[in-house]
């Protein structure tokens, strides 16, 4: 998103002219006389027009917080640009969810709010959102990707774990978390109403019945079709396989560490830097504070709309020792 804003700002800059750009390009790549004419009268004006158009198409993002690396605006680009639905003020910034181990996730709803229940349709949806024309969806290639993500497993936790704590943590997980997060749990893979889980609701507001209706039409007359798209009003209780690697946590990536998630929201980190890839094995998550994280990372402010770290109070009432044991167990999932 920041990249699109940057390119549009370049194209709107008064210095974006053939007189400025051709000598700059020629410094890196020698240009013949005919190349220069082509750049002056076709390539530069056409690029400028396209970039300005791109910027206008995404102008609605200017009023919303930047997603930053590792997060995307999930469905608003499709709603506004592909489907021509009227602009609204919803915010759809989310983390990319992990897509490993999907054979074990079969039967679970997909996307953070479970807007799809069929894996093939979910991958076609991704292809369309990335710009694939509806009449040119590479179904066989998508099938290969699907086969891969069905079987690829998350990497094991790479550091040593304390086995005593792990065995103390397992019953705590079974009693407090398993119903929603263990494979086979009663509510695992299902939608938990947002009023119940209490996390930021912008992502739920974004996905509308009008968007569902458009998706249900878009495959008409194609080799493929969408028949499993739906509107739900909560977030999926995801299985926690490979959870050690999935920081920052929650659909909007608003909680940097597992230890933070087990604190009440008032005590969770308010501003942090995401995108730095060095690990903190005590707090369990990528280091999100300090000079290196600030230099490498993207500043995440939980007070911005769509960025709230509220809700998900499960486990916050456990004792310090119990939390430590639970976190040790979570490393092994
Ligand atoms: C009633 C169901 C429920 C229970 C019980 C529950 N959770 Fe959750 N959990 C959820 C939902 C729903 C989400 C997704 C919320 C969101 O992303 O906004 C979630 C998200 C998470 C995530 C983030 C996943 C990710 O990929 O970022 C972690 C970690 C987590 N829960 C751990 C726990 C732990 C540990 C416990 C037990 C102490 C627990 N949960 C108990 C429903 C539950």
Image (cartoon, grey):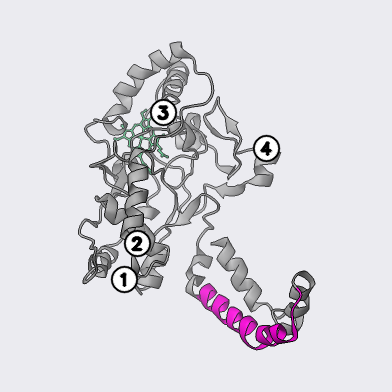
Res. 115 in view: no
Q: Are marks 2 and 4 in contact (CB under 8 Å)?
A: no
Residue at 30% from the left image edge and 48% from the top image edge: 110
Quadrant holding the C terminus: top left
Q: Which residues are magenta?
A: 30-56
Q: Give the labeled residue for mark 2.
A: 138
Task: Decide which of 30, 186 is in the foreground and name it.
Answer: 30
Residue at 76% from the left image edge and 69% from the top image edge: 28
- Of circles 2 and 3, the one toward us is 2
- Of circles 4 and 3, the one toward us is 4
Q: Quadrant of residue 196?
A: top left
Distance of label 1 from label 2 (alpha carbons): 9 Å
> Residue 145 location in percent, x, y?
37, 50
Q: Is 28 situated above or below 177?
A: below
Task: Decide which of 116, 150 is in the foreground and name it.
Answer: 150
Q: Give the labeled residue for mark 1.
A: 135
Distance of label 2 from label 3 (alpha carbons): 46 Å
């Amino acid at each position: 998103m920041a990249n699109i804003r940057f390119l549009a700002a370049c194209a709107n800059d008064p210095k974006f002219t053939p007189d400025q750009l051709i000598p700059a390009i020629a410094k890196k790549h020698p240009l013949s006389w005919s190349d220069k004419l082509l750049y002056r009268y076709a390539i530069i004006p056409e690029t400028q027009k396209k970039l300005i158009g791109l910027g206008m198409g995404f102008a609605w993002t200017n009023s919303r917080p930047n997603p930053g690396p590792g997060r995307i605006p999930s469905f608003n680009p499709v709603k506004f640009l592909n489907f021509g639905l009227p602009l609204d003020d919803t915010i759809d910034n989310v983390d990319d969810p992990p897509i490993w181990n999907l054979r074990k996730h079969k039967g679970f709803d997909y996307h953070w709010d479970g807007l799809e229940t069929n894996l093939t349709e979910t991958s076609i949806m991704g292809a369309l959102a990335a710009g694939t024309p509806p009449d040119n969806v590479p179904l066989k290639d998508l099938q290969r990707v699907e086969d891969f993500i069905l079987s690829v497993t998350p990497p094991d936790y790479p550091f040593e774990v304390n086995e005593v704590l792990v065995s103390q943590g397992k019953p705590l997980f079974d009693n407090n978390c398993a119903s929603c997060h263990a494979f086979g749990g009663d509510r695992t893979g299902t939608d938990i109403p947002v009023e119940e889980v209490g996390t930021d609701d912008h992502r739920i507001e974004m996905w509308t019945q009008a968007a569902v209706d458009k998706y249900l039409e878009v495959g008409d007359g194609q080799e493929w079709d969408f028949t499993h798209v739906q509107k739900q009003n909560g977030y999926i209780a995801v299985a926690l396989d490979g959870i050690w690697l999935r920081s920052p946590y929650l659909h909007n990536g608003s909680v940097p560490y597992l230890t933070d998630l087990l604190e009440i929201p008032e005590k969770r980190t308010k501003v942090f830097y995401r995108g730095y890839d060095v690990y903190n094995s005590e707090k369990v998550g990528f280091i999100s504070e300090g000079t290196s994280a600030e230099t490498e990372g993207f500043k995440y402010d939980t007070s911005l709309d769509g960025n709230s770290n509220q809700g998900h109070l499960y486990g916050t009432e456990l004792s310090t020792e119990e939390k430590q044991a639970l976190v040790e167990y979570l490393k092994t999932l």
